[in-house]
Image: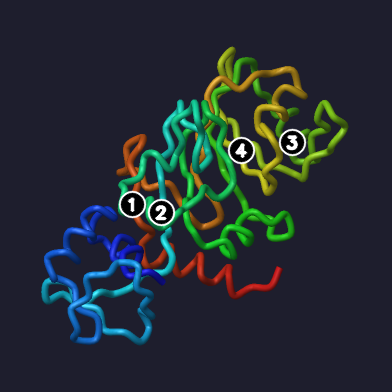
Amino acid sequence: MRLDKLLANTGFGSRKDVKGLLKKKQVTVNDLVQKDGSVHVDPAKDIIIVNGKSVQYQKYLYIMLHKPQGCISATVDDKERTVVDLLSESHQHFNPFPVGRLDKDTEGLLLLTNDGELAHQLTSPKKKIKKTYAARVSGLVTDEDIVLFKRGIVLEDGYKTKPAELIILQAGDISEIELTITEGKYHQVKRMFEAVGKKVTYLKRLSMGELQLDGTLIKGEYRELTEEELSYCLSLKKEKS
């Protein structure tokens, strides 16, 4: 790995900041001053010191984001603000991407990582990872809907969804519900309610597997996963698809 990329990825600032550190002879590799950021180093073998501080390399990044409405689940877009745009430059250097998608007008829990294997485990249909949403629905949601969702809903394209758990929190002209599904079809929650003659007007993801949205994160805020959350994610990687 290039030395400048490694330093940027381990919290020493932007590439420009790192270039300044190198120019000022504040970086040593195996006790030798290194001014060339393009030189390749092995973080597992080489001893890298910046201003007397040993560099600990972090290969993967795991971030929990409270996604706000108005940004898209993508890494880059010419017109729209993306979820990656919400991250600091030091975190963007890891090249994280969203695991699964939340619609532009949907908010809530979104995991961003550069760990492709974990992303596959969390989104693979074979894994049947549960995803729970809170929603406001225009129309009276009834016990009959609970039964229909449990059986699976036939969408407008003929696809029948896997069984889903629907909980009615408040029934009325505007109903409040929680819905747990094990799939991630395009606009699935919205399409399921449309199939029973109702419309989702607000949607928020609360959880994904054992990952629960941190209630202290305001919309647009994020943090790295805790040790317990990371342990859960790593356990998924050990399982075979």
Name the residue nearer the viewer: 162 or 144: 162
Label 1 vs label 3, nearer the camera: 1
The span from disc 2 to disc 4 (Cα, nearest Å) is 24 Å
The span from disc 1 to disc 4 (Cα, nearest Å) is 25 Å
- Residue 149: which disc? 3
Circles 1, 2 touching at the beta carbon (< 8 Å): yes
- Residue found 66% across the figure and 44% down from its top: 181
Circles 4, 3 touching at the beta carbon (< 8 Å): yes
Place of residue 210 in the rendered image (x, y in percent of width and height, measured from the top left): 51, 57
Q: Which corner quadrant of the image does residue 37 belong to? A: bottom left
- Residue 223: which disc? 1
- Residue found 41% across the figure and 61% down from its top: 61
Where does the N terminus fall, quadrant-wise? bottom left
Q: Element type at marker 2?
A: strand
Place of residue 194 in the rendered image (x, y in percent of width and height, measured from the top left): 72, 22
Name the residue nearer the viewer: 124 or 76: 76
Q: According to the image, label 2 marks what residue?
A: 63
Q: Residues within 10 Å of mark 4 (few under 14, many from 20)?
A: many
Q: Earlier in the sequence, mark 1 or mark 2?
A: 2
Circles 2, 4 touching at the beta carbon (< 8 Å): no
Give the amino acid at mark 2: Ile
Label 3 vs label 2, nearer the camera: 2
The span from disc 3 to disc 2 (Cα, nearest Å) is 32 Å
Q: Residues within 10 Å of mark 2 (few under 14, many from 20)?
A: many
Where does the C terminus fall, quadrant-wise? bottom right
Name the residue nearer the viewer: 20 or 158: 20
Place of residue 5 in the rendered image (x, y in percent of width and height, measured from the top left): 35, 63
- Residue 179: which disc? 4
Give the amino acid at mark 1: Arg
Circles 3, 2 touching at the beta carbon (< 8 Å): no
